């Protein structure tokens, strides 16, 4: 980060500048059919308590059995975060009473997590790049859900989520603005989706973050932090940081001290409020779960997963810039979502990638955004957009007609080549026909011809007239050449 961007991240208080420091603990639900220690389904939205095994309900005598698929997913994620994979890790019991956690403890990893240090490269709009350190990734069980709104006197519990595998991904306190934190979570989500290890669906709670915020004078030691629990949208993460930083600055500027607290974000007011302070913090009495042996992995198991890793967004971005000559901005737009990049690569395959990128970004994404449609539901499929690009390349249609064809495919569907044929949209490259149109326009506008001789830029007006006369089907290049010759400009 250069001095200039560093400076722009400071907040000006009444008594001088402050720097925000942010570290995130992201909980990502592992994409897996079964739970971490039982065979019960993880499908979202089932009837309450329809996906609960005896293990998840913590019936006496039940024993957890580790799900190898979840282990592989955690390793895959670790590799995607360029992190250290620990061949030996340990599952611990984290003891606390929670009404929707029937075991009375959560099985988690404490001292020996499955994944150690890694990093995430975050590129912001405007070219700023931040490298956020990953401290660790560990596996743990999710809890169930208490329902307090079903009955006037009783609370109910839904244990469908109980025992679902979560990856807790802990960042270093490397972020300095709410924008950086939002971009980090987006990037992390993109990586997880490319890897297929978490669907990243924040509305369904598959990805949520504990947001740690502190403030300090630039260059000073880290300040006391507050942790905002369970923030479940990227926008809320940004809002909670903005609010929390200002709250802390106000206290410090008034001569007060920050009390290390756990806080909650209220989406309705955009404020955070205290939940518990450090003095009331739990003592979890972690100890190794006696029901589970330490997890010992072979290097071959890890290597096999590494070989199977897909190309990740950073590598794709670099390749698009180096091999396709795309701008960093265009490359960022394309790699941001796995579905977008899959679509683009299907269009670009065997074609001019730069032209494909232009069509995908400007026409397709433009239209999808405008109409609020997701790329996977695009009415224009990649093969159809590919044929449109082919038709332009072959000079069968002009870029302008191509937009009309795109519009027809969007609303009516169909094969672009057939549409062009059936509706007579083919570009006229026959110079005889174009020449007739050019001659007619010249003959009808003698005074403009005189003006054009003085002002060669007038040729644009003539091109427009000829295109109009040919219903846009004349090859603009041919029209230009003929006009130049005939007008002598
Ligand atoms: P704990 O285990 O008590 O939650 P950690 O030291 O593991 O505490 O830190 C948890 C998270 O808080 C990490 O993401 C870390 O980057 C972040 N963090 C630690 N210190 C600070 C600080 N002073 N300001 C902001 N974030 C911090
Ligand atoms: Mg914590």
Image: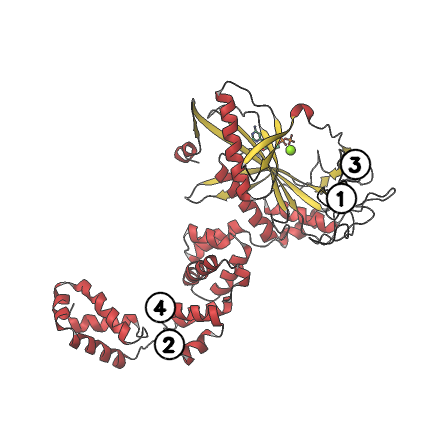
Residue 408 spot, x, y in % from top left: 44, 71
**SS category of the residue bearing label 3:** loop
The image shows residue 199 at horizontal and vertical percentages of 62, 52
Question: Of the residues tagged 1 and 2, which is closer to the observer?
Answer: 1
**Which is nearer the N-term, disc 4 or disc 1?**
1
Answer with the quarter of the image where residue 4 lies.
top left
The residue that disc 1 covers is 157
Residue underneath mark 2: 425
Marks 2 and 3 sit apart, C-alpha to C-alpha, by: 71 Å
Q: Nearer the viewer, residue 153 or 94?
A: 153
Mark 3 surroundings within 10 Å by alpha-carbon count, few (fewer than 14), some (14 through 19), many (20 or more): some
* 476 lies above or below 109: below
Q: Nearer the viewer, residue 234 or 26?
A: 234
The percent coordinates of residue 266 (x first, y second) are: 58, 37
Q: Secondary structure at mark 1?
A: strand
Q: Which residue is mark 4?
A: 400
First in sequence: mark 1 vs mark 2: 1
Alpha-carbon span between mark 4 and mark 2: 11 Å
Residues at marks 1 and 3, CA–CA distance in whole angstroms: 14 Å
Question: Is 365 placed above or below 438 here?
Answer: above
Closer to the chain start, of discs 4 and 2, is 4
Are dots 1 and 3 in contact, CB under 8 Å? no
| Colour convention | secondary structure
State which mark lies toward you, 1 or 3. Answer: 1
From this viewpoint, is residue 91 visible?
no
Q: Could you tell me which secondary element the residue under label 2 belongs to?
A: loop
Residue 375 left/right relative to 40: left
């Amino acid at each position: 980060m250069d001095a200039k961007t560093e400076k722009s991240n400071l907040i000006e208080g009444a008594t001088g500048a402050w720097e925000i420091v942010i570290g995130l603990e992201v909980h990502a639900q592992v994409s897996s059919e079964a739970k971490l220690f039982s065979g019960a389904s993880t499908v979202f939205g089932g009837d309450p308590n329809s996906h609960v095994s005896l293990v998840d309900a913590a019936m006496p005598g039940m024993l957890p059995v580790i799900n190898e698929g979840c282990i592989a997913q955690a390793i895959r994620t670790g590799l995607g975060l360029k992190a250290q994979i620990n061949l030996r890790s340990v599952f611990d019991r984290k003891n606390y009473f929670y009404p929707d956690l029937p075991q009375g403890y959560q099985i988690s990893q404490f001292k020996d997590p499955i994944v150690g240090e890694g990093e995430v490269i975050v590129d912001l709009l405007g070219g700023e790049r931040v490298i956020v350190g990953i401290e660790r990734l560990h596996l743990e069980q999710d809890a169930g859900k208490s329902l307090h709104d079903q009955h006037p006197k009783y609370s109910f519990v839904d244990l469908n989520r109980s025992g679902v595998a979560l990856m807790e991904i802990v960042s270093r306190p490397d972020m300095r603005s709410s924008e950086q934190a939002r971009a980090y979570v987006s990037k992390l989500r993109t990586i997880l989706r490319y890897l297929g290890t978490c669907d990243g669906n924040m509305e369904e709670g598959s990805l949520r973050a504990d947001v740690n915020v502190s403030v300090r004078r630039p260059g000073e030691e880290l300040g006391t932090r507050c942790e905002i629990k369970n923030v479940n949208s990227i926008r809320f993460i940004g809002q909670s940081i903005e609010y929390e930083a200002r709250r802390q600055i106000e206290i410090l500027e008034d001569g007060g001290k920050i009390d290390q607290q756990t806080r909650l974000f209220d989406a309705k007011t955009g404020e955070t409020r205290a939940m518990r302070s450090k003095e009331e913090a739990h003592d979890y009495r972690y100890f190794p779960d006696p029901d589970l042996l330490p997890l010992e992995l072979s290097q071959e198991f890890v290597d096999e997963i590494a070989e199977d890793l897909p190309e990740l967004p950073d590598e794709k971005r670099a390749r698009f810039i180096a091999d396709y000559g795309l701008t960093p901005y265009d490359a960022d737009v394309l790699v941001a979502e796995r579905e977008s990049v899959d679509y683009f690569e299907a269009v670009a395959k065997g074609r001019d990638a730069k032209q494909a990128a232009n069509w995908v970004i400007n026409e397709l994404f433009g239209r999808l955004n405008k109409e609020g449609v997701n790329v996977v539901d695009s009415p224009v499929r990649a093969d159809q957009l590919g044929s449109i690009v082919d038709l332009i390349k072959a000079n069968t249609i002009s870029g302008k007609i191509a937009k009309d064809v795109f519009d027809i495919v969007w609303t009516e569907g169909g094969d672009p080549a057939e549409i062009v044929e059936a509706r007579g949209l083919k570009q006229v490259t026959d110079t005889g026909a174009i020449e007739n149109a050019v001659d007619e326009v010249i003959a009808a506008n003698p005074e403009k011809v005189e003006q054009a001789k003085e002002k060669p830029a007038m040729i644009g007006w003539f091109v427009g007239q000829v295109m109009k006369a040919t219903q846009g089907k004349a090859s603009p290049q041919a029209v230009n050449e003929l006009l130049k010759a005939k007008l002598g400009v």
